[in-house]
C-alpha cells in the first residue's frame, strides 16, 4: 500500500452514502456503511460505470449504468467473484477519511 492521503472529512459522507474522490489522477469510490468507511476503484469492470455514483444497500453498491453489484468490503461482484474491483485501505484520523491507493491502481513504479 502507498501513503495515506485525506480524501474527505467523515461528516461529508453520511451513513449509507458514497462519493467519488480523485487521488493523483485515480478515481476512487468511498462509502460510509454505518460509520465504517470503505474505498474501491470507482470504475466498474463491465463498462466503466462510476461506482461512487451507485446506490449503496448495506455493504453492496450497485453500478448506476448496468446494475452490476459489488461488495464494498471485498470488491467482489455479488454472485460472480471472478469479477472484482481493487479495494483501498481506509483509516480515520480524527474527522479525516484517509485512503492508501494500492499498487494495482497506480501501475508499475
Image (cartoon, helix red, strand yellow):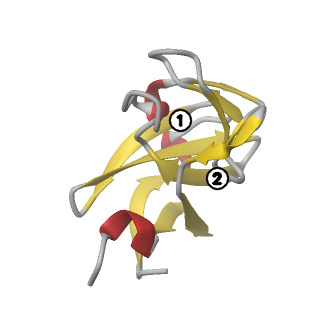
Residue 21: x and y, percent?
35, 47
Q: Secondary structure at mark 1?
A: strand
Residue most toward the left?
Answer: 25
Please give the count of numbered marks on the rendered protein.
2
Q: Earlier in the sequence, mark 2 or mark 1?
A: 1
Q: Nearer the viewer, residue 46 or 58?
A: 46
Q: Is residue 4 left or right of residue 22?
A: right
Residues 28 and 43: in front is: 43
Give the left or right position of residue 44, taking residue 94 as reference. Answer: left
Which x, y percent locates residue 43?
A: 40, 40
Q: Is residue 56 left or right of residue 8?
A: right
Q: Which residue is mark 1?
A: 18
Residue positioned 41% across, 82% down in the render? 3
| Residue in the picture at 46% in, 35% down | 44
SS at mark 2 in the image: strand
Give above or below for 108 relative to 14: below
**Which of the labelled discs sits on residue 37, or is there none?**
2
Amino acid at each position: 500500500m502507498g501513503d495515506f492521503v485525506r480524501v474527505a472529512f467523515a461528516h461529508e459522507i453520511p451513513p449509507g452514502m458514497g462519493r467519488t474522490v480523485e487521488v493523483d489522477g485515480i478515481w476512487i469510490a468511498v462509502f460510509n456503511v454505518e460509520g465504517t468507511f470503505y474505498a474501491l476503484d470507482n470504475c466498474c469492470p463491465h463498462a466503466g460505470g462510476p461506482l461512487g455514483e451507485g446506490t449503496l444497500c448495506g455493504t453492496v453498491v450497485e453500478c448506476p449504468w448496468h446494475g452490476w453489484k459489488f461488495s464494498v468490503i471485498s470488491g467482489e461482484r455479488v454472485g460472480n467473484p471472478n469479477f472484482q474491483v481493487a479495494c483501498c485501505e481506509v483509516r480515520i484520523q480524527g474527522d479525516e477519511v484517509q485512503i492508501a491507493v494500492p499498487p494495482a491502481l497506480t501501475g508499475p513504479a
